[in-house]
Image: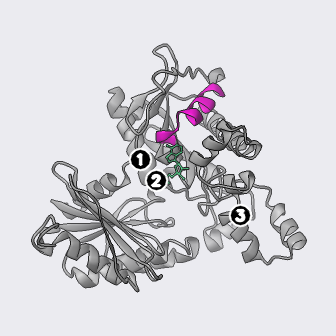
Amino acid sequence: MNILVINCGSSSLKFQLIDSGTENVTAKGLCERIGIEGSRIVYNKEGQAKITTETPMPTHKEAIALVLSSLTDAQNGVITSLKEIDAVGHRVVHGGEKFKSSTIINEEVLKAIEECNDLAPLHNPANLIGINACQELMPGTPMVAVFDTAFHQTMPEKAFIYGIPYKYYEKYKVRRYGFHGTSHSYVSHRAAEILGKPIEDLKIIVCHLGNGASVCAIEGGKSIDTSMGLTPLEGLIMGTRSGDIDPAIIDFIAQKENLDLQGVMNVLNKESGVLGISTFTSDFRDLEEGMKKGDPNALRAMEVFAYHLIKYVGSYIAALNGVDVIIFTAGLGENDSYIRQVVCDGLTCAGVKLDPVKNNVRGVEAIVTTDDSTVTAMVIPTNEEVMIARDTVKLVTK
Ligand code: AMP
């Protein structure tokens, strides 16, 4: 089957056409600056060079139309007609408590996703726009929603309830939801496959370290705790997000800087994290460059980031009462041997013994610990799109 996977952001849209039999990506690409001047589509047919075309995309509907015309283009397309797309899998960020797994999209599901908009105001409305545009342009093609939050719906109450009045959970569903679920699920299953062990027997901690970053504790294939919360702001220090802070800082900064609530939230989402600490970048590649030159700002940001990460992994070893596998994934986790080394060196007390030679890898599946390490640390490149395609096939062929 040909599955089109769509990941809609507020001004961007990523897509992949996946052959579900081989799991090959026959074409993929990105629409950027949707609704902004200078919008462009980058289209990449398997085995060919990327084609970038600047063209106006006032809304996501024009973006989806361009994706579909690129896929069916006589010269560079990979299919001859839209009828060859058997189904569309949509990444949806927040499924609240309602969605514990992926689901076929119908009117009722659309309404329920809309009801979660409050919980993810930056993401869910964009996801919905993408779904609506696809439905308009491909009527009759089955669509599936795959939620970032669904994998974490197995968390026990003790892990998802906050220390605030319980009535806010009852009235407004304020609780930990967690994100990156599709990624945590993919890499943990892949680790079990690579190790040749049933996932039911494994205690796994996944460090998804990208622009957004989260840690997840997985027991027997089920998420039992994760660092992101009601929103993706909680947890690890990230590129521009603060992660955990004393909540009283919000009022303190608002008063000192004469900011309203929204102003402070903007600081915490967009001006904090390693960008805020380093004062110059949210990108770990720049931090590493800076560290090589002895830049104290880069050193400070990396040190604080790594320290928080080690503390999180340590606390999840306690939550799981042990750990068999630690996985590093996403941009930083897959590519940066330095951060893996710092984290593993901080966890020698738990039996993690890094092999510096094995750790010298980028973007490939690898075990990076020594043969006698009691905990296996691994690099596993994430593949959220293939998970979305798999769930889509499962649901539409049911
Ligand atoms: P993602 O959100 O998974 O695309 O990850 C993007 C982030 O990964 C970037 O902002 C970088 O900080 C980090 N990253 C990507 N490649 C490298 C690399 N080679 N070395 C260090 N960090 C990297």
First to last magenta residue range: 333-346
Rendering coords of residue 7 (x, y %): 38, 66
Disc number for residue 268:
3
Rendering coords of residue 127 (x, y %): 42, 73
Among the two numbered marks 1 and 3 on one chain, the one whose residue lies closer to the N terminus: 1
Tell me: 362 left or right of 228: left
Rendering coords of residue 373 (x, y %): 52, 17
The residue sitting at 27% across, 77% down in the picture is 66
> Going by the picture, which residue comes out furthest to the front?
293
> Label 3 near label 2: C-beta < 8 Å?
no
Residue indicated by mark 1: 185
Q: Magenta region, mostly helix, strand or loop?
A: helix
Could you say whether the residue bearing mark 3 is in a helix, strand or loop? helix
- Find the distance from the CA under tag 2 to the CA under tag 1: 6 Å
Callout 3 amino acid = Leu
Could you say whether the residue bearing mark 1 is in a helix, strand or loop? helix
Label 2 neighbour load within 10 Å: few <14, some 14-19, many 20+: many
| Residue 76 visible in image | yes
What is the quadrant of residue 302 in the picture?
top right
Nearer to us in this view, 281 or 199: 281
The residue sitting at 62% across, 61% down in the picture is 175
> Label 1 near label 2: C-beta < 8 Å?
yes
The residue sitting at 48% across, 17% down in the picture is 370
Tell me: 387 left or right of 276: left
Front tag of 2 and 3: 3
